[in-house]
Amino acid sequence: MEIVISVAAKIAEYTVAPVLQKVKYVFSYQSNIHELKVEHKRLVEKREGVQLQVDEAERNLHKVAPAVASWLERVDMINKDVTGFFEDEVTVDLKCCKGWCPDLKTCYLLSQRAKEKSAAVTKLERDGNFDEVAYPAPPQKLGRTFAYGSKDLESRTRIMNEIVDAIREEEITIVGVYGMGGVGKTTMMKEVIKTVEKRNLFDEVVMAVVSQNPNITKIQDEMADRLCLNLDNRGEFGRAGRLRARLLERKSTLVVLDDLWGELDLEAIGIPAGIYCKILLTSRSKDVCKKMRSRGIFQISVLLDTESWDLFREMAGDAVDSLDLHDIAREVLGECGGLPLAIATIGKALGHKEKHIWEDVLEQLRKSTISSFTEMQESVFSRVELSYKYLSSEEAKSCLLLCCLFPEDFDIPITYLVSYGRSLRFYKGVDTLIKTRNRVLALVDKLISSCLLLESNRNDCVKMHDIVRATAISVASREKAFLVSCDSDMGQWPEEDTGQDWQAISLLFDQLPNHTCEWNYPKLKLLQMACINTSQTLPDNLFRGTKELKVLTLLGLSIQQAPSSLQFLLNLQTLRLEFCQLRDMSVIGTLKTLENLSLVGSELEELPEEIKLLKKLRSLDLRGCKGLRRIPPCVLSNLSLLEELYIGYSFDSWREYGSGRESNANLSELTALHSLRDLVIWIREPEILPKGLLSNKLMRFAIQLGHSPTWYSCTSQNNNILLGSPSESSKTKGLRRKGTEQPLTVRFPSSWHAWRPKSNVLTMEIDGEDLLTKNINVLLEKCEILDLDVRGLTNIPMNWTKQDLSA
């Protein structure tokens, strides 16, 4: 019986159960269809919820998890299948026998398929439970995030390749790039990043902006964001350690630090400089690059002329090529000085503008009236002014502002900065000229390193970029009440009612305006005037209302008789009457406080005897004086504080000591000048050279013994303030001869002031016997350049051979 029951059960399992199941499908048709609709609706709703999360993640640039993307695809497929099932199959006619009987086969098939699809939908709904639907996407290559720049420039491409080559050197771990604000340092960094990524030189490249007030946390977050690194809320050392470990995780990383203003503590940030982590930094100061121990340092300079024009045309459009605007556009471009930011700013601002707007902007740029040119003020001059404000030394700021007193593209002699700054008490803690000069040279080096000044091709000079000069004039006018007008067309004196607070005035005239009244500038401390027409004289009462004047420089004037109002300048410390026609200068004896007197390049028959009354005089410069035949006796010997004496070839009529009552000075007077440190002198007749003339205290000298001038050219071209036929390279921008478009070349006497004894030079054209008898051992010990033309010398003293003549 048990066997029969077992066999019957199996028969029922394989026959009756399937039949019953099929019968059940027929009778459960409606419920299965309803269940599929319900489950399908739930799946659709769940998909919508997941899709909302995906959309939010994508808006935040997150990457959708692969499982979520696959689930959405499967949902879309089954949704399409279920929708088609309802539309195409469930709506078929379920009746047969002319509507009297249900179509059992069709009901069975539809019910079975609905049950199967419902199970699949239910499973897919369960699979749609995700902890995270998306994750932060790995950052794309840094170079791809930069906007398209301007066209390639040859000079930029060349230096970019040099920077990339330096980064690849194994022994170089830190590379520094510096340049003035707006010159394109950041743009260069972006091009470098694009290049190293294109060449796959590093596994990762990260970049952070440092700025003038570094925020270590901000720098770390900026780098961590680039590296997709979570620094959490760790402490300072924990954040640095985690960042350092991440940077060392890959084989090689390039870290770009943009806009450094001072030394940055890499260890505190978590940047490990080494062979696997190279650092590329930018700064406005070369000194900062050195402090960061950069082994490769590159300067980004201004653009070449052709590159400037190409960039300008790209920014301003083809209108600059029209006959109407081309010449004006060229002049506007010239005022930009090759600075890319200025070129781009002006080009965009003036593109498609009318001619009168171009002319107005050109006039503003020429006269450095930047306040009314909003675009330049906001984007260019503000950056330069920030560099000025960031200078830590007030002395450096003052030195920079002194440089704006001179015309554009001018070679500014260091000696001007020394005498001007010393007289105005800009430099603290220096009591001699040599110390003051050393201080100025240090300040100039700092300003050059900060890209606020430029090196000059002239010895002992410095230059200033046009944009920096315009900014400095603006700052000086606000902070120190400077008035600077290097405009030869200036037809009148400055308005006195607007100039009561002027402390410094620098003017360049084509012709001196008529002026019958005295100036009333009670706070004026510095006055510098140059006149191209040397036939004009100064009003006699001009200085009566400028009693606080400490620096007076007059260039290119005819002074037949010095204005009597000079006697009121009881505080005057620096007087420069250069390239002037001088006659009666007796009033100079009243200037008891005078420390610096320069008559460079002037026409002067004799040195005023009243100079001996200037007991505080420290510097006397007579180089290039024309027609100087007489230096009265006892004038030089009375200048006991004299530190610098520059005579050069201007005077050669020295009388021999003890030769009677001659009208000229003798060289023995120089032995009384115990403070003398710098000397430039020509002694035509070596036999009158007194023994012991030159002491051990002499530090810098250029001495010519003999008849043949060999130091430097004394041609009239170097002596003139105005060259009648200027070459293209010497034209002074912005200056025009009155009534014409002809550029003027104005030269302050930089060709003379630039030549001071930087190297100790001794030139001798002398008989051998005289050489042996003269006491010049002191000179030979300090001599750096020795030019001998000796006749009749058979033996050189042995005590000279190794020590004195080694130079």
Image: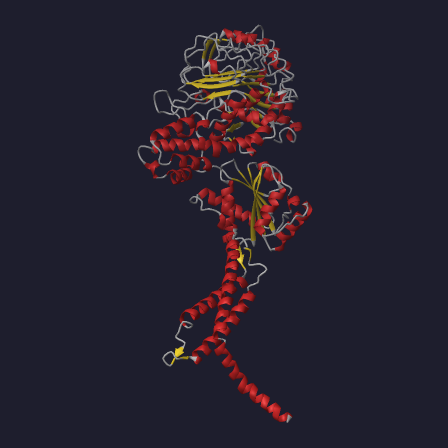
Q: In the figure, 147 relative to 503: above or below?
A: below
Q: Residue at x 49, y 49 (%)?
A: 145
Furthest-left residue in view? Answer: 323
Q: Is residue 421 above or below residue 5?
A: above
Look at the image and tell me whether residue 413 can be seen. Answer: no
Q: Nearer the viewer, residue 481 or 680?
A: 481
Tell me if 360 is positioned left or right of 207 in this view: left
Rendering coords of residue 456 (x, y %): 50, 30
Task: Give the quadrant of residue 249.
Answer: bottom right
- Residue, far front: 100
Above/below status of 478 relative to 72 = above
Image quarter hosting the N terminus? bottom right
Give the camera-side residue of 385 and 538.
385
Q: Residue at x 48, y 73 (%)?
A: 30
Give percent across and percent down for residue 21: 52, 81
* Residue 502 in sight in this render: yes
Front position in the image: 270 or 44: 44
Residue 299 rendering spot, x and y as whole percentages: 53, 39
Relative depth, front residue between 106 and 588: 106
Q: Quadrant of residue 740?
A: top left
Colour scheme in use: secondary structure
Q: Position of residue 587 (x, y in %)?
A: 53, 7
Q: Quadrant of the C terminus?
A: top right
Q: How many marks?
A: 0
Quadrant of the rendered image containing residue 610: top right
Give the farthest residue toward the top: 661
